[in-house]
Amino acid sequence: MRDNFNRQIDYLRLSITDRCNLRCRYCMPAQGVPLKAQNEILRLEELVTLAQAALKAGIRKIRLTGGEPLVRRNVVSLVRSLHALTGLEEISLTTNGILLPALATPLKEAGLVRVNVSLDTLKPERYAYITRGGNLHEVWRGLRAALAAGLEPVKVNVVVMRGFNEDEILDFARLAVEQPLHVRFIEVMPIGMAAAARLDYVPVAEIRARVEAFYPLQPAPGVKGNGPAVNFTFRDGRGSIGFIGAMSEHFCPRCNRLRLTADGRLRPCLYGDEEIDLRGPLRRGASLEELVALFRQGILCKPQRHHLESEGRRQGLMSQIGG
Ligand code: SAM
Ligand code: SF4
């Protein structure tokens, strides 16, 4: 379905938990965030019903996120149930990768098509620092497991922060040359803890210039994805590279998505305050048609664009909204 600005909205980011096994400094406070009570979080059947309504409202692709989606028990059965829904073209997942070694194959068998693994540094000490205790070797094992399971493509999301990991841009580019991995550089956004920590983004134009000084890039419009990344391949590379200019480039005109928080609030825009409660109506016995109408309402109230660069920082945490 098209929104008021003629954008085709066919992609839903479904947060399935607000919990996480890491505490990335730009995403969560050290002590974690106050978690929702168990009965506030959507149950598996509720997630499936809402996904069904979303599909009837024109959604075609669903990405599971969180928090860390793989800490949710029964994530494999959830994927299996979603996969069985008519009209769903693709299920993907964004994860920190820590739990992928055990889950990659069962998820693939349940119908998961592809994964994005978040990894901001290739240095073990830095990884432990930025995630407050994460073990980089577990992420490597997770990436290998995803490739071995045949999840395709496997993307690596790199949030670039001025003064923290900008010196690793070429290392990540080399990773995409040598491995069948699709590296996506993302500008850190002033949301949640990144706002509090006043982390600065590195404009994607600058990242790209640094990569191109060493590796000639070729446009790769064909790399599978849903969103705002601009993608390139290397002449003799196995993977690809992409740039997501969340701050410096206006991808709002190409925005194709809705978000649903783990406790059932529909968010038309990551950066806006607008939300529509779906859990209340669902638990009060709303019909599928009524839920479809709420999704349509969500699509129609998508704003034209965000004003992050002029408004500055935003409250609200990515782990709670569903990154
Ligand atoms: N836990 C999973 C993970 O880390 O991939 C999924 C949820 S996480 C909130 C989703 C993505 O949001 C991650 O790639 C993370 O790096 C990114 N993210 C979190 N805070 C961000 C910020 N302030 N700016 C840009 N990206 C951010
Ligand atoms: Fe957890 Fe993902 Fe946020 Fe890191 S970015 S704290 S892994 S939810």
Image: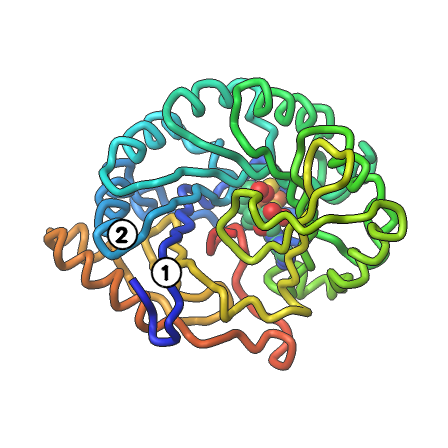
Instruction: Residue at 26% x, 31% y: name it.
Output: 84
Is residue 27 at all visible to an observer of this figure? no
Q: Position of residue 291 (x, y in %)?
A: 19, 56
- The label shown at residue 54 is 2
Residue 9, label in figure: 1
Q: Is residue 227 left or right of residue 141?
A: left
Q: Is residue 181 left or right of residue 251?
A: right
**Which residue shows up at 76% across the image and 48% down it?**
217
Depth order, front residue of 250/234: 234
In the rendered image, residue 176, in percent from the top left (x then y), is placed at 73, 36
Q: Amino acid at mark 1?
A: Ile
Which part of the image, by quadrant, shows the N terminus?
bottom left
Q: Quadrant of residue 182?
A: top right
Say which element carries label 1: loop
Which residue is at 29% across, 36% downward?
44
In the rendered view, would you say 41 is above or below 302? above
Q: Are marks 2 and 1 in contact (CB under 8 Å)?
A: no
Q: Which amino acid, mark 2?
A: Ala
